[in-house]
Amino acid sequence: MNLFGMIDQSGSAMQAERMRAEVVAANMANAETTRTSNGTPYRRSGAATGSLSGSGDIAPGVHIAAVVQDAAPPLKRYDPSHPDADAEGYVSYPDINPLTEMVDLMGATRAYGLNASAVQAEKSMISSALDISK
């Protein structure tokens, strides 16, 4: 693999980490959403990444394989005055733990930063190679 291929690899990883951060942001924004358009509480999502060797129309690198919904049942809280309360007075809330989401966001942020540093190092190596060839 050449240096330009390494930049492509790091770039695809940065795109995957950006998407991962967006999924975390959506989870945090909907942590109290008790009713979505289909009438159920919001379900936590997660980004499943995968490494591809470059087949078909997909370039090699890191890609989001899928955004999957968590199968965990909603959390029940007693609040009979809530408009979404059931007959027993319980409201179904998404099973979203802010600490878990923040850890996921920190991981995505650090991985994005590391890949950005790798791109900068690769650009520096290319620049140095061009300077040597002068």
Image (tube, rainbow, N blue to C red):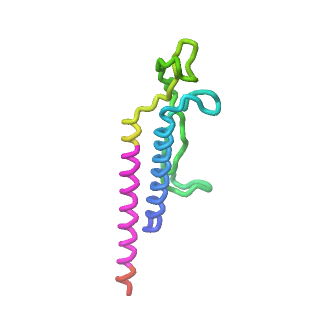
Question: In the picture, residue 123 is in which quadrant?
Answer: bottom left
As displayed, is residue 120 above or below residue 80? below
Question: In the picture, residue 122 is in which quadrant?
Answer: bottom left
- Nearer to us in this view, 80 or 118: 80
- Nearer to us in this view, 68 or 90: 90
Position in image of residue 54 (x %, y %) = 54, 55
Report the residue at 45% width, 56% height from top: 14
**54 left or right of 120?**
right
Q: Give the farthest residue toward the right.
A: 38
Main secondary structure of the magenta stretch: helix
- Nearer to us in this view, 77 or 74: 77
As displayed, is residue 55 above or below residue 8? above
Which quadrant is the C terminus positioned in?
bottom left
Q: Give the farthest residue toward the bottom.
A: 134
Q: Give the farthest residue toward the top.
A: 88
Residue 81 in the magenta stretch? The answer is no
Report the residue at 47% width, 46% height from top: 20
Report the residue at 62% width, 56% height from top: 57
Q: How many marks?
A: 0
Any part of residue 50 in sight: no
The magenta span reads 105-129
Residue 120 in the magenta stretch? The answer is yes
Any part of residue 114 in sight: yes
**71 left or right of 111?**
right
As displayed, is residue 3 above or below residue 105? below
